Each structure stands twice: as C-alpha cells, then as structure tokens.
Image (spheres, rainbow, N blue to C red):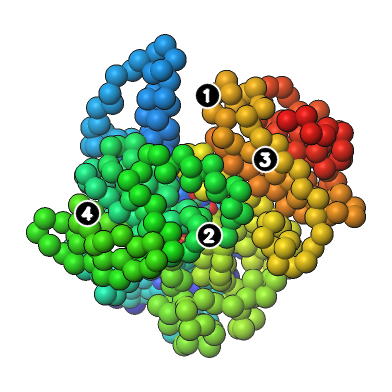
Amino acid sequence: NESNLHAEVLVLGGGPGGYTAAFRAADLGKQVVIVERYPVLGGVCLNVGCIPSKALLHMAQIVHEAQEFSGHGVDFGAPKFDLDKIRSWKDSVTKGLNNGLDGLVKQRKITRIQGNGSFVSENQLQVDNENGTQLISFDQAIIAAGSEPTKIPAFPNDDPRLWDSTGALQLREIPEKLLIVGGGIIGLEMATVYHALGSKISVVELMDQIIPGCDKDLVRPLHNRIKKQYEAIWTETRVTAIEALEEGLKVSFEGDKAPESEIFDAVLVAVGRRPNGKKLGAENAGIQVTEQGFIEVDKQQRTNIPHIYAIGDIVGNPMLAHKAAYEGKIAAEVIAGHKAAFDALTIPSVAYTDPEIAWMGLTENQAKEQGIEIDKGVFPWAASGRSLSMGRSEGMTKVICDKETGRILGAGIVGPHAGDLIAEAVLALEMGADAEDVALTIHPHPTLSETFAFASEVVAGTITDLY
Ligand code: FAD
C-alpha cells in the first residue's frame, strides 16, 4: 500500500509551530504537505495544553469570584459541578478551533496526511498509519514535532491516579486530596482548576520558590494567596517515592522542610517536558539530536542539514506556543527566499494562575547576575482604582530600565489579567522605548494598563514616593 507523494515543503507536526509554518509557506506560494499523527491539528497547545487549560481556568475564575463576592452583597450559594458538562464545554472550545484550522488548511490547498512520520533519508519521510505506509519525498522540511510530559520512571505511571497534564485536563474526577509535583506554571494552573472544583491541594517543589526563574517579588502575591487556599506548599522538597496502595497513592518526601509521607487520592506530576527529537528517525537524514532530544538550529531555524529546519518545543526552551509560531514563520520565510531570522528581543512568559504572573525581558535576578545597573519602578496595585474595584489589591507592576539611559530592559506584572497587560511592555522593549516614552503615553483611566505607565513614571521621575 505504498504511494508516492512529493512536497516542496514538508511540515512534520501539526501544532502551533507546524500549522503556522505550513500556512506561511503556502501563502508564500509553496506546495505544502503537513504530516500529523493525530486526526486533529493544533498539537499540544490546542488539544491538551494552552486552550483546554484556559477554558478550565475561566471556570475556576468564575467560581472564585462568585465565592469572594458573596461578602459584598451578592450571594450565589455553593457551586454545583457537573463534570460531564464542564468537559463538553471545554471540548467544544477546542473543537471550534480544530475546525477553524481544518478550514484554513483547505483554503490554502495544503495536503494533509495523518500518520506517524519518520525520516528514511535526507529527502524522504515515511508515514505509517492504519492503512499502511506512505513515502513522501521533499525538497525542504520543517520539523515541528514538539514535546511530551516528562515521566519519572520509578513512579507507578500506569496507575490511573497518577496524572500528567493531559490526564489532569481530562477532568475524570475531583480527587479529595490532590498533590501537585512541580510548582511551575503547568502544575500551578492545574492546582487553580482543581482547587475551584473543591480538591484539597498540596504542592511540592524542588527549588526554593514556586515558578522558579521568575523574580521572587512577582511570585510573592501568588504564594501568599494560595498559601491560604491550599493545604501545603513545600519548597526545597523532593518526592522520593510514590507507592500505589488501595486507599491512595502514598508519597514520600526528602529535604529539610519535607513532611512525613502522606496518602493522596491523586498525584499530578508536572516536572517539565521532554522534546520528541529521538523519535523521528532523524539519524537517517543525518540530523543531529542532542542527548536530551533537542534539535539544534541557527537563527534561521536551520538544522545541520541545510534544507531541513526545526521549530518550537523540539528546538529548545522556553517551550511556549508563541515562540513555536514565531519560529514557524521564520522557517517558512527563509525557505521562500526571504531574509528572515529570529531576532525577537524577548519571549514573554505567563502563568495563568490567580493572580496571573507575566514577565518579559531582563529579570531583576538576571540583572544582578550579569552586573547590569538598573533603575526599577514599582507600582503597587493597592493604589489602582481599577484593581480595588475588582476586589483585588495584591498585584504590582514593575519596570526595569537601564540606569544610564532609562531604556526599558524588562518588566514583570502580577495581578488579574497580567498576561494581557505584559504585551505593552514587550512592544515597548521591541521599539526601544524609555520609561519616559511610556510615562508620556496617555493610558485610559481607570484601567490596569495604567499601572505600567505609573511604574514607568517612577523611573522617569515624574511621580515620586506618592504611593
Ligand atoms: P506541539 O504542540 O507539541 O505539536 C507537535 C505535533 O507534532 C503534535 O500534534 C504531535 O502529535 C505531532 N507529532 C510529533 N511527532 C510526530 C511524528 N513522528 N509524526 C507525526 N506527527 C508527530 N504554551 C503557551 O505559550 N501558553 C500556554 O498557556 C501554555 N499552556 C500549556 C498548558 C499545558 C497543560 C501544556 C502541556 C503546555 C502548555 N503550553 C503553553 C506549551 C505549548 O503547548 C507548547 O509550547 C506548544 O504546543 C509547542 O508547539 P509545537 O508546535 O512546537 O509542538
């Protein structure tokens, strides 16, 4: 059952990196074939990542806001959960976007092949599916095969009570006691969801803070809030063993602050993601893959084989959808003969927790490590009329500028909608703005966006210790 197909541009993987690359290449006049092992496009992000998690986080936000507003004259009563309905709502969000992608593929006359792709030479990919094997030859290829959750081999990975992020998003049950292993973004987002559903949450993190890599002052408002909501947050603590017992999963810990071993109804392991580089027959095409499974690329997304490109999670950190899509466009443009290269100054990070935390550019920690002299402007949201109108006062906006020139080097925001607000700071950095440029820009009142202008005014010296 072997048929032959040729592609000017072959894209391996239909996630945000792959479909963006395929669309851009087709728009630039290339004949494109996209290979995806699943029947749906969208990859991890759309099917088991960014989008379903945000749909569930929206549900969590409604629950929390209703609970918190009950002290202010509107009582909604205790929430009742119908998991089947919540799940179908979440699935409908994903399905709508899947259908949208299908339409965009058809519109561009991109050939779509379902199956597991593996290189057989530097100009051929073999695709296996239930109907057999198909060989696709190509002039140029873009690898966008993504990543998968890291599994810890010693844990009882076959036990249905041990979840990865995909399992947690399936919303099969509401465990009474849920342990989150890994206090990073994905773990804490799922903690937010299950806390809203009524689970008792504990978090264990190896490093000395949750969301490692982010400045401590930005993490503190989140830590202080969830400390009150959750059973425990154990930092500098390692899980040494998980034992499957009939009554639950018995977890043992190690570290100075480690608790006694404890039984949980479910455990979510969110300790990072592993690139899929070693599963593609890359060696048959001569593509170098690192020990960890990453494929190294240059600024034009080119691998060591000049007509094969790679983008997204498989080329390295940060493993984020907006980075994958940006790289996808570059690869497609380079293939089409454009003088394109990865030259973004920063890739913003967002934890969609409650409060959200967003940061971009230089962090204060990095400035210290690299000996860069900075000026810092901080605006506490306790002085923001809009934030107080939302019943929230714990947020803050911080801008980090070059001490000499005032040029914006970084920014961090913690508070509701921080993820949306950080975009202005990214634009300011990309445009080479000074704190004064932002300070002189009229921001609408009363909005949370004003807090970035006020923090910039602190650096520009147009407001002093008013707050
Ligand atoms: P992927 O999305 O992993 O897509 C790769 C595709 O390739 C998959 O569809 C896979 O099936 C296919 N594939 C792999 N190997 C083969 C093969 N051999 N043959 C055929 N097909 C193959 N990022 C954000 O920016 N914002 C968020 O809010 C966010 N939330 C997240 C929440 C969760 C729970 C998780 C797990 C991730 C989240 N991410 C988020 C990360 C984001 O999902 C990834 O960075 C993004 O999906 C990477 O895109 P990609 O195109 O590189 O790869």
The amino acid on which the numbered mark 2 sits, given as a three-letter code, is Pro
- Where does the image place residue 356, in percent across and percent down from the top left? 53, 42
Marks 1 and 2 sit apart, C-alpha to C-alpha, by: 28 Å
Above or below for 425 versus 14 = above
- Where does the image place residue 219, in percent across and percent down from the top left? 55, 48
State the residue lying farthest toward the left: 246
The amino acid on which the numbered mark 4 sits, given as a three-letter code, is Phe
Mark nearer the N terminus (1 vs 4): 4
Disc 1 is placed on an element classified as: loop
The residue where tag 4 is placed is 264
The amino acid on which the numbered mark 1 sits, given as a three-letter code, is Gly
Horizontally, residue 57 falls left or right of residue 410, namely left
- Where does the image place residue 344, in percent across and percent down from the top left? 72, 59
Mark nearer the N terminus (4 vs 3): 4
Crowd band around label 3 with a 10 angstrom C-alpha radius: few (<14), some (14–19), many (20+): many
Crowd band around label 2 with a 10 angstrom C-alpha radius: few (<14), some (14–19), many (20+): some
Q: Is mark 4 within 8 Å of ligand 1?
A: no
The amino acid on which the numbered mark 3 sits, given as a three-letter code, is Thr
Q: Residue at x 64, y 71 (%)?
A: 301
Q: Residue at x 76, y 34 (%)?
A: 454
Q: Is mark 2 within 8 Å of ligand 1?
A: no
Near-viewer residue (77 or 220): 220
The residue where tag 1 is placed is 391
Near-viewer residue (373 or 32): 373
Disc on res. 397: 3
Marks 1 and 3 sit apart, C-alpha to C-alpha, by: 17 Å
Marks 2 and 3 sit apart, C-alpha to C-alpha, by: 19 Å
